Amino acid sequence: MHISRSIEILVGFFVAIGFVAMFFLSMEVSNLSNANSDEGYDVIANFENIGSLKVRAPVSMAGVNIGRVKAIDFDPDSFEAVVTMKIDAKYNQLPSDSNASILTAGLLGEQFVGLEPGGEEEVLVHGSQLEMTQSALVLEQIIGQFLFSSSSEE
């Protein structure tokens, strides 16, 4: 009876460790582990269409994650989406004429913001506005354009 009790305690201990590991894994996958990081600076970009871009989506340059999407708003004057990105403080030498594109990870994966560096010597600072942007490619619009163009040729 003494051996079965210690085995039960050991199994319970491993189950508890499993739950803790699952919690940390889910936090990492959902990007909540560093969502409240205040270190860095905000950069703003306007897009005609952001597709399914979400808050906390990655912001990357050359395939390296350099920040997160902080907020997504709508500008009623220009009828564009306003995306605010929080760039990590260690990436403080990005050229001010960098451009932003909304890209898709994989064929039907999540969307993220990809930055490409420009050639200016001035760097992005808190509150900088990116002038050159490229909106998301929406699969439904591309298919619709293809179908429309092929039906008009007949």
Image (spheres, rainbow, N blue to C red):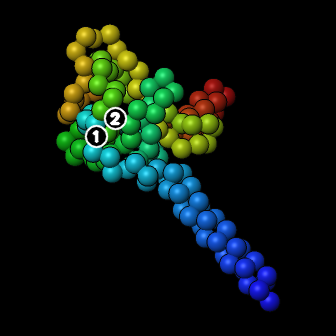
Screen quadrant of the C terminus = top right
Left or right: residue 9 compared with residue 68: right
Screen quadrant of the N terminus = bottom right
Task: Judge whether residue 144 can be spotted in this image.
Answer: no
Mark 2 lies on a secondary structure that is: loop
Q: Position of residue 111 (x, y in %)?
A: 50, 41
Q: Nearer the viewer, residue 1 or 138?
A: 1
Q: Residue furthest front?
A: 2
Q: Nearer the viewer, residue 154 or 62?
A: 62
Left or right: residue 41 compared with residue 3: left
Mark 1 lies on a secondary structure that is: loop
Do the CB atoms of the residues marked 1 and 2 lie less than 8 Å apart? yes
- The residue beneath circle 2 is 88
CA separation in Å, label 1 and label 2: 6 Å
- The residue beneath circle 1 is 39
Q: Position of residue 33 (x, y in %)?
A: 44, 52
Neighbours of disc 2 within 10 Å: few (<14), some (14-19), many (20+): some
